[in-house]
Amino acid sequence: MSDQETPVSGKAPDPPPGPALRPVRGAARCAVAALALAALAWAARAVWHVRLAMAGQPASGPPDQGGGQHRPLTALEDSYHLVSSWGGAVTLLCALAFLLWLDRVRDNARALSGTEPRYGYPWLILAWIVPVVNLWIPRGIVADAHRSVFPDRRLPAVVNWWWALWLAGLAGGVGLVYADSTDEVIARAYTDVLPLLAADMVIVAAAGTAALMIRTLTTAQQERMDETAPTGRPGTAS
């Protein structure tokens, strides 16, 4: 053997490590807790809608008198403003917790399947706010994260139930996205409370279904992660 020859080893070099799996159970628990708070917030709104309807509109008329004029709020109307503000803050917290969970699920799906997500990272945010595409891409992101890991399984039905309830909550401008101001919603509660109550109940149901979906998909992904851990697969967390 010449000095320039290098002995050839019979062992192939180790493959480069794959993407590391991220803990998902903690993020799932946070998202479920936030959804429970959101459901409570919207249930509280429903209670105040009923209280407003039962109290009846004051003789002075609705809070928004038109032409930029607003009368002083009653104690009940003022408390509804507080409940509405609290609900908005909780909804924002819920959205952040949900996105953090979804980000981890997507990353783990990429590591477990070895395939890139169907929708790029910017869609994790844009999918919820861009008109028209927000009617289907958010569901597609969730479905893709599950199907990439379990291509031989049917998508859990709870995903479709969650998305149907979410869309119903968005419909009509009386649910998750109010087209009216808080004072205008108060006036609607005085005159036609049933659509408001229907929207409130749909949103509470959507929050409960979303929590069930998170538990279902997280459990499935965690089981796959546990299966790969003993094999010493590159990128698998111990």
Image (cartoon, rainbow, N blue to C red):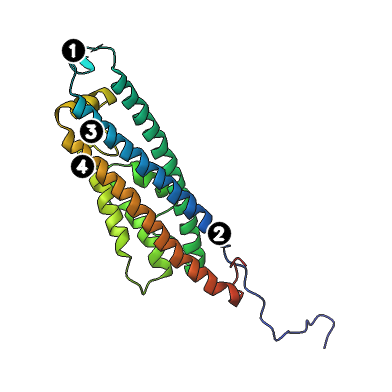
For the residues marked 3 and 4, what is the alpha-carbon distance in whole angstroms?
12 Å
Between disc 1 and disc 2, whose residue precedes? 2
Is 34 left, or right, of 22 in this rendering? left
* Circles 1, 3 touching at the beta carbon (< 8 Å): no
Q: Secondary structure at mark 3?
A: helix
Between disc 3 and disc 4, whose residue precedes? 3
Between disc 4 and disc 1, whose residue precedes? 1
What amino acid is at disc 1? Answer: Ser
Of discs 1 and 3, which sits in the foreground?
3
What amino acid is at disc 4? Answer: Ala
Of discs 1 and 2, which sits in the foreground?
1
Residue 54 or residue 16, whichever sits in front: 54
Dot 1, crowdedness within 10 Å: few (<14), some or many (≥20)? few
Q: Secondary structure at mark 1?
A: loop
Of discs 4 and 2, which sits in the foreground?
4
Q: Secondary structure at mark 4?
A: helix
Of discs 2 and 3, which sits in the foreground?
3
Q: Residue 36: image x %, image y %?
A: 40, 47
Q: Secondary structure at mark 2?
A: loop
Between disc 4 and disc 2, whose residue precedes? 2
Is 146 left, or right, of 165 in this rendering? right
Please give the residue where the numbered disc 1 appears in the rendered image.
Answer: 60
What amino acid is at disc 3? Answer: Val
Please give the residue where the numbered disc 4 appears in the rendered image.
Answer: 198
Q: Residue 49: image x %, image y %?
A: 24, 32
Q: Residue at x 65, y 75 (%)?
A: 14
